[in-house]
Amino acid sequence: MLIHESNNGIEILKFDNVSKLNILIAQSLKEEVAQYLTKANTKLVLDLAGIEYVDSSGFGALLSILRNAKNNDSQFKICNISPDVMELVKLLQLHNVFDICDNVVKCVESFE
């Protein structure tokens, strides 16, 4: 479901042929991302390019990943959010919760 690449110690995860982040994949997403948060101080980017729809389970999975990262002294950022999904993010006030960047390059540059 996810494609992994590393860039200067930053873990970048992209969805492979997925357009909906919903109840059907939310649990798998949490489990797959958790593998990259086993070490403290991990820098993780989740690229949402191609995701056109996120339901409550999807947002729950993203919040769970964020909580897991914080509990592990890691940093978690998301990027490439579609305009429709960004509307929901703002409606739910999650733009104040997540560290959101426009694209992968800006995410990578934003890590201290």
Image (tube, rainbow, N blue to C red):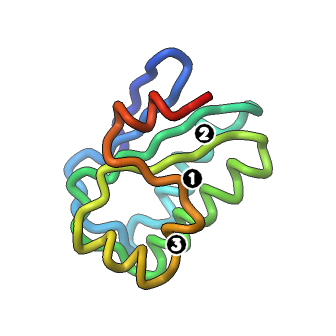
Write down the residue under mark 3. 94
| Residue 63 image point, x, y percent | 59, 66
The mark nearer the N terminus, 2 or 3, is 2
User: Where is residue 35, by image quadrant?
Assistant: top right
- Tell me the residue at 20%/50% (across/down): 17
Horizontal side of residue 69 vs 86, given as left or right: right
92 vs 15: above or below:
below
- Tell me the residue at 35%/67% (across/down): 21
Q: Nearer the viewer, mark 1 or mark 3?
A: 3
User: Which quarter of the image is occupied by the C terminus?
Assistant: top right
- Tell me the residue at 72%/31% (across/down): 41
Q: Are marks 1 and 2 in contact (CB under 8 Å)?
A: yes
The mark nearer the N terminus, 1 or 3, is 1
Write down the residue under mark 1. 31
Q: Are marks 2 and 3 in contact (CB under 8 Å)?
A: no
| Residue 31 image point, x, y percent | 57, 52
User: Where is residue 7, by image quadrant?
Assistant: top left
Name the secondary structure under disc 2. helix
Horizontal side of residue 16 vs 29, given as left or right: left
Name the secondary structure under disc 3. helix
Name the secondary structure under disc 1. helix
Structural distance between the alpha carbons of marks 1 and 2: 7 Å
Structural distance between the alpha carbons of marks 2 and 3: 24 Å
86 vs 43: above or below:
below
Mark 3: amino acid: Leu
Write down the residue under mark 2. 35
